[in-house]
Image: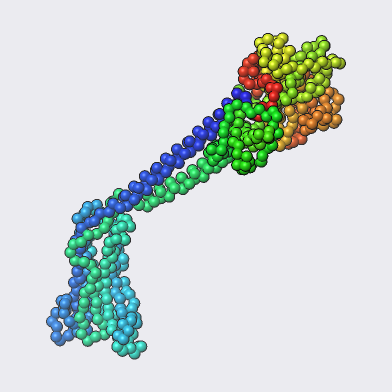
Amino acid sequence: MSEAERRKRELYRKHRKGWITVQIVLMIIVAVIIATVGLSYRSKNKETTYITYSESSSVDYKVHVGANDFYEEEWLDANQAYVAALIDEIKADFSYTLTMDEKDVDYTYSYMIDAQLKIVDNNSNAAIYAPVYVLKDKQTFSKGGDAPLSIAESVTIDYDKYNQLATNFINIYKLDRTTSTLTVRLHINIIGSCSDFKNNSQNEYVVALSIPLTQKAVTINLTSNIPQGTGKVLACNNGFNADAYKKALVALTVGEGVLLIVFLFFVYMTRNEDINYTIRIKKLLFNYKSYIQKINNRFDTDGYQVLEVDTFNEMLAIRDTIQSPILMSENKDKTRTLFLIPTNTKILYTFEVKVENYDELYPDSTMNDGAAILKEEFEAAPVQETVENEVSCEAEEPCEEVAEELAADEETIDEVVEEVKEEVGATEVEVTLVSPEELTQLDLDDDAHYRKYGPSLDYSFEAKLSLSSKETREYYKQICDFIVGYGVKIVRSWKRERIYQGRNLFGLFIFRGNRLAVALALDPKTLHAKYHAKDLSDMKKFAKTPTLMKITSDRKVKYTLQLLEQLFVEAGVENRKSPMKTKLVPQRTRKALFEKDLIRIKGAKKDIED
């Protein structure tokens, strides 16, 4: 993994961890607020006050009699019997008083006066007829402070009217054994400022006068459920608003739920293959720590028959069967882990966990000036099982420099030889094998020594581009500017750069020798001869991009841009005419590139970790 890839991975994980931390802190803050509001509601909702009150009620009435030869007074006082035939009307004075010791208790009260005519069957005590007549409409008032509540109302009752109504009902339906009564009632209802007052206190009272009807003699009775004297009533503190607290709790709870959903969605959506790999390895180590032995050095597979196992459970079964430890070897980039079980019979069981599709990760990385979207793909350096080779020839152009570039392009020796012939115009090429011991003598500062042992180096695309001439790098920049203008992506791997959008692969940036080239997804047989394109359709790795344009001049750049535009138009890609420009790739020394892990030394043996 290059230094740039490490920086991108660290930056991605840092940003992801930062956002996760922010969301967790936010959820904790909201949870604390919910707990605080809930405890405050619970505490304040119980902060009730027992208020001592003094309560009294009374009804005073007078009976008005019609003209007669016996009573000198027109109005007879209360608490005596009356001749029903002489009663004209009755005047009733209702009063109610409530005094609280506590100040600033808010409450609402209402009252009304009605009269109920009731005819009851004496045999069953069931009401036969019971209409209600409103004598005083309902009145509602708000009360606060320490002033007492006082109600005083007077009503006049037309006794003859109701008595005649009851008599007619009985006569029409020929009823006997019935009792008729007119009840005049004062209803008082007190409502406190919170539910405790309403639910836990006696706050609805009735004061009533019961007047017999259809009788020769009448005795008026007074009934009331209002307690006389002092007692306690339950009330809430004046400033507590229970509804506001409840609404706040609901809103905060919903908000916490939304934050949790967003958090889970974010964690799931940002868990790429790299993070999933790390989590999977940690789970395996946590669950099977006693079965796994981590090794720091590379395992030499020479002489072993390597058998790949599909699942870790199969590795556990093998371990239990042969009683051999499970060895764990992870590469330094922490992108690939091998679990190994070696046996005395030279059979090596392996199970691999690695980051799949590493080249699709961290898509937001850009060049230094933020122009072209260039992403370095993870691609481990190819490992040679045979000894390294050197290519030499005799020609006007130094073929060693051509050979060193071609050998770094993952081609076979035969392909390298053919390319060298083509580049330098040689008819014969001599191949010399170099032993692994000689590779240790490599001196990057000694150009002659370097050229001699050039084929032992593995060059990345970025290294080749950085070592190329300024003219070549200018050509590369022009093509990148054109591609970025269409909004098409340029994605870098170890050996090449892919030009694509979605599933459309338009071409590849590659190096053929020390020459920059573009392999295009076009059929070379359909192109005009003026393009001088090379046909790579016989090479398997260029099956999707068989048309090769070597970028050696401004005209070749122009032709390449024409062919790229043709591909973009056919794919329906519109030119965004982006004003962004890519930065010219700087030129660096081989030593600097080697230190940045952009040039690697190929090993002579296959290491299990590579």
* Residue 5 found in image quarter: top right
Residue 102, quarter of picture: bottom left
The relative height of residue 317 versus residue 524 in the rendered view (above or below) is below
| Quadrant position of the C terminus in the picture | top right
Determine whether, in the image, residue 158 is placed left or right of residue 295: left
Residue 254, position as x, y percentages in the image: 46, 48
- Name the residue at the left extreme: 72
The residue that appears at 80% across and 29% down in the rendered structure is 539
194 vs 385, nearest the viewer: 385
Tell whether 62 sits left or right of 431.
Answer: left
Q: How is the protein colored in the picture? A: rainbow
Give the residue at x 55% y 42%: 265
Q: Is residue 194 visible?
A: yes
Query: Residue at the location (56% across, 41% down)?
Result: 268
Q: Quadrant of the N terminus?
A: top right
Position in image of residue 338 (x %, y %) = 63, 33
**Left or right side of 408 for 161:** left
Determine whether, in the image, residue 226 is placed left or right of residue 309. left
**Which of these two is toward me, 419 or 556?**
419
Q: Considering only vertical position in the picture, is 153 above or below 172?
A: above
Question: Which is nearer the eye, 557 or 403?
Answer: 403
> Please, is residue 328 above or below residue 245 in the view?
above
